[in-house]
Image: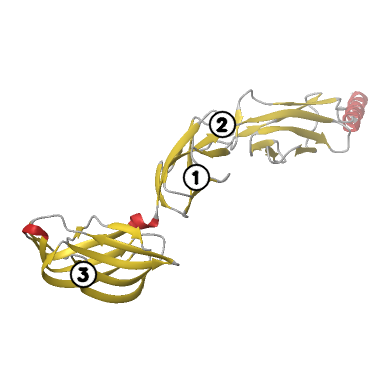
Amino acid sequence: MKKNLLLLSLLALALTACREDDPEPRITALQITAPDTTLYRGDSLRLRLTPTPPDADIRGAVWTSGDSLVAVVTPDGLVRCVGPGRTVITARLEGTSLSAKYDLTVAARATQSIAFSEPTLTLLVGEEQPTALVFTPANTDDRRATYTSSDTAVATVSSQGVITARGRGTAVITARTADGGQKAECKVSVQHFTERISVWLSGTWIYESDNLVSACARMTLRNDSNRDLFVERFIVESDGREIHREEIGRTLSSGSKLACDVTFKNAHDPQFKYQFTVGSEQYEAHYRPHMIGAKTFPADGPRTLPIVVSRRR
């Protein structure tokens, strides 16, 4: 009995020693598998590395991406999509010549529509205005666009979408996606700076028959243009003869205004004039009354006069 037990013990030890000496299964191949899905920028994908035989140890696998602008991969095979394109994900087993490759495609989100953030613009000659396009969907991948103008004498547009006002008139700026599939339009109206100069009227004005006018009022000149005005003087004429003159000699910058008070009686066919210069050019803003009757306009609610701005010779 003791002899048999001894033999069994020796046999168990021999089998244990044999198992401890068994080598790891030799890996003959590697394969990368993944779910079949369409990938876009921002998506993630878990790749699975399968050896042959399947029970072999692959803990030494190293993952790399052929193009990090398309996708990157973590040490455990998690792919993060960076941008549209194609790349190859490779898994290599350290200490061997074995590797596996996976062709990865990141699709581009198609643009469904584009629109200008400001579909209409009013500019002054010489002004520049950057534009912005709104893409749908908002996470569209290809945001490239080309720009054209319907009338370059009125407005031109750069490759970056910056509009430059060239001359009076109206032009349509068109933006098209790089593939030409979508377009948007922006209507641009270009004015001369003189169209942004206004005169306000407040106080009491009495318009009588035979074009006789009496006034105790204030006229306010406002500059909403993109140019500085050097205002020289304010003049009131009756039948072409000066009855009031106020020398001003002041620069009126954009967004500024100045007021002149005037009082007179029974002026015939009066004209009211602001004379100013812009650079070396001389201008005059003038107004001639065309109403009959007494009118009073409060200072906090002045009336805008239909003035005419013209070059002086």
Residue 134: % across, % down = 47, 40
Q: Amino acid at mark 3?
A: Arg
Q: Amino acid at mark 1?
A: Ala
Say above or below: 292 vs 232: above
The answer to whether 50 appears left or right of 113 in the picture is right
Pointer 3 local density, CA inside 10 Å: few below 14, some 14–19, many at least 20: few
Residue 205 visible? The answer is no
Instruction: Look at the numbered disc 1 and give the secondary structure of its residue.
Output: loop
Residue 200 visible? The answer is yes
What distance separates the C-alpha of mark 1 from that of mark 3?
42 Å
The answer to whether 288 appears left or right of 49 in the picture is left
Say which residue label 2 marks. 109
Instruction: Look at the numbered disc 3 and give the secondary structure of its residue.
Output: strand
As drawn, the label of residue 296 is none
As drawn, the label of residue 153 is 1
What distance separates the C-alpha of mark 2 from that of mark 3?
73 Å
Pointer 2 local density, CA inside 10 Å: few below 14, some 14–19, many at least 20: some
Residue 37: % across, % down = 61, 25
Q: Amino acid at mark 2?
A: Arg
Sooner in the amino-acid sequence: mark 2 or mark 3: 2
At horizontal 20% and vertical 73% (from top left) the residue drawn is: 244
